[in-house]
Every structure is written in C-alpha cells, then in structure tokens.
Amino acid sequence: MDDKEILREKVRNLAAEFAGEGDAFGWFDALYKQAAGDNEQIPWADLEPNRFFVRFAEETNLQGDGRNALVVGCGLGDDAKYLHDLGFNVTAFDISPTAIEWAKRLHVKTGIKFFTADLFDPPKEWYQAFDFVLEIYTIQPLPLEMRPKVIDAIANFVKFPYGKLVVVTRGREDNETPTELPWALSRRDLSRFDENGLKQTYFEVMQGDEEPPIPRFVIEYAQKAENVQLFPE
Ligand SMILES: C[S@@+](CC[C@H](N)C(=O)[O-])C[C@H]1O[C@@H](n2cnc3c(N)ncnc32)[C@H](O)[C@@H]1O
C-alpha cells in the first residue's frame, strides 16, 4: 500500500465510524479538523484546481464573462479560485465549517463568497439561480442510497433556462458494483440529471494517474432545448 492508499483507508475507517452512528456527513468536518491545516492529510486537497476540470475548461475555452457560478462541496476552494480567475462571479459552499474557514484564509483577496451550507438545505435564493454550477467529487463519497436525492439537489441550482452544470466524478460501467468509498458513478446514475430536465452537451472519459488508472467522467449539462421557451405564450 502506498501513502495515498494508507490515507484513503484511514478516511474510509473514519467515514465508517460516523456511518455506524447514522451520520453520513460528520466525517468530512472531522477529517478537515484532524488535518489541522495540513492539506496532505486530506486525499482530495492538493491546493490546485482539479486537472480533469482544467482540461475541460481549456478544451472548451470556458470564460466567465461576469456570469455567476456556484461550486458545490468546494472543500478548500481551489476550483472556486480557478473559476474566479476565468472571470466568473463565484459563490462556493461546503458542509464543513472547518473547510470553509480554511478556504477563506487561502483565497482571502479574491472576493469569492464562501458559505457553510448543506446541499440538502441551501439558501432559498440559490434555487435555479446559477449560470454555471460545478460539482467535483461531492456525489461519490455520499451513500449510494442518497444518490438520486444528491443529484436532484445539485440540478436545482442550475439557472433556467440557460444555466450549465459540469460534473467531474470517478466513473464506472453500469454493470460494475462499486465496492468501496468513493462510490464511482455509472451512466445510469447520471441519467438522473436528465430526469431533472438537463441534457448532456459534453461527455469525456479521462484516465487518472493511479495504478491501475481510475476513469473520471467529465460531463457538461445544459437545460433541455424543448424546456426552453424563447417566446413564452
Ligand atoms: C471528496 S470532497 C471534494 C471536495 C472538492 N470538491 C474537491 O474536489 O477538492 C467532498 C466535499 O463535499 C463536502 N460535502 C459533503 N456532503 C455535503 C453536503 N451535504 N453539503 C455540502 N457539502 C458537502 C465535504 O465536506 C467535502 O468537502
């Protein structure tokens, strides 16, 4: 086992401890707290924007042009900072108060609006409010039985009629059963976004640098054209 895998095992044990007490979320803040300012104690926190998302942004020439963006489960805020640098007006939130305080310290001069908030109980004014929603690795660590609810909650942030959403996640085939946290998403899982009135406008499978490599799905969604009435009656 290499150091990264040892760390992941520790995180799985922590998550299982909380799950044993019926708490699916408490382990995130516990982990950020235990890390005590050392990002290397957190498997996903590398103080850089997600490289699969950066590839998407470069390939599609993503530009903010002052549009508003929401980063879901933002952790230490490096993807929020990347969107800010692309010219978005960024709001970012996480359920962990420790992560949010840490993110605020790291990105103090940016003007990014960081909030402690729960995906399942967000401020009402965020409903269908964002031109661009970014979700990276927040669906996959949450329990599988919550997955449809998590996806519905994320889809609800996308502005109607012209908002977009990008999801970056570990991917698996529909006939593969996920065996351990983080629970990769299949195309069937993702079809729940379509049920929320979104359609895929980009789908790319990118390979991670683990050995063996773990595939990442990078997906962009837009509102379905048939839902968009340009000239409402
Ligand atoms: C695997 S981490 C990914 C963090 C960040 N997106 C990244 O890629 O570095 C998942 C994040 O989702 C947050 N999270 C988990 N459940 C949440 C919820 N119900 N509402 C908001 N954030 C949540 C966790 O605190 C954690 O920071």
Image (cartoon, rainbow, N blue to C red):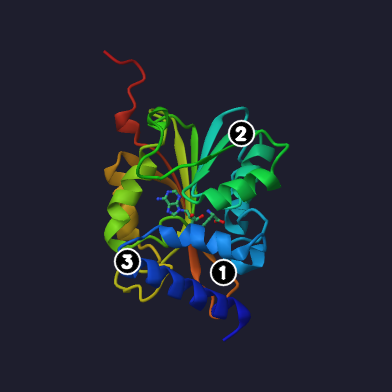
Please say if the residues under marks 1 and 2 sit with CB atoms less than 8 Å apart: no
Q: Amino acid at mark 3?
A: Glu
The picture quadrant where one finds residue 109 is top right
* Percent coordinates x, y for residue 229 in the rendering: 32, 22
Which residue sits at x=64%, y=53%?
49
Which numbered disc, 1 or 2, marks the residue that appears first in the sequence? 2
Q: Amino acid at mark 1?
A: Gly
Q: Which residue is mark 3?
A: 21
Q: Amino acid at mark 2?
A: Phe
Lateral position of residue 197 relative to residue 77, left or right: left
Q: Nearer the viewer, residue 105 or 143?
A: 105
* Percent coordinates x, y for residue 172 in the rendering: 39, 68
Q: Nearer the viewer, residue 217 or 112?
A: 112
Q: Which residue is mark 1?
A: 208
Q: What crowding class fits label 2: few (fewer than 14 Cα within 10 Å), some (14-19), or many (20 or more)?
A: many
Q: What crowding class fits label 1: few (fewer than 14 Cα within 10 Å), some (14-19), or many (20 or more)?
A: some
**Element carrying mark 3:** loop
Q: Which residue is mark 2?
A: 88
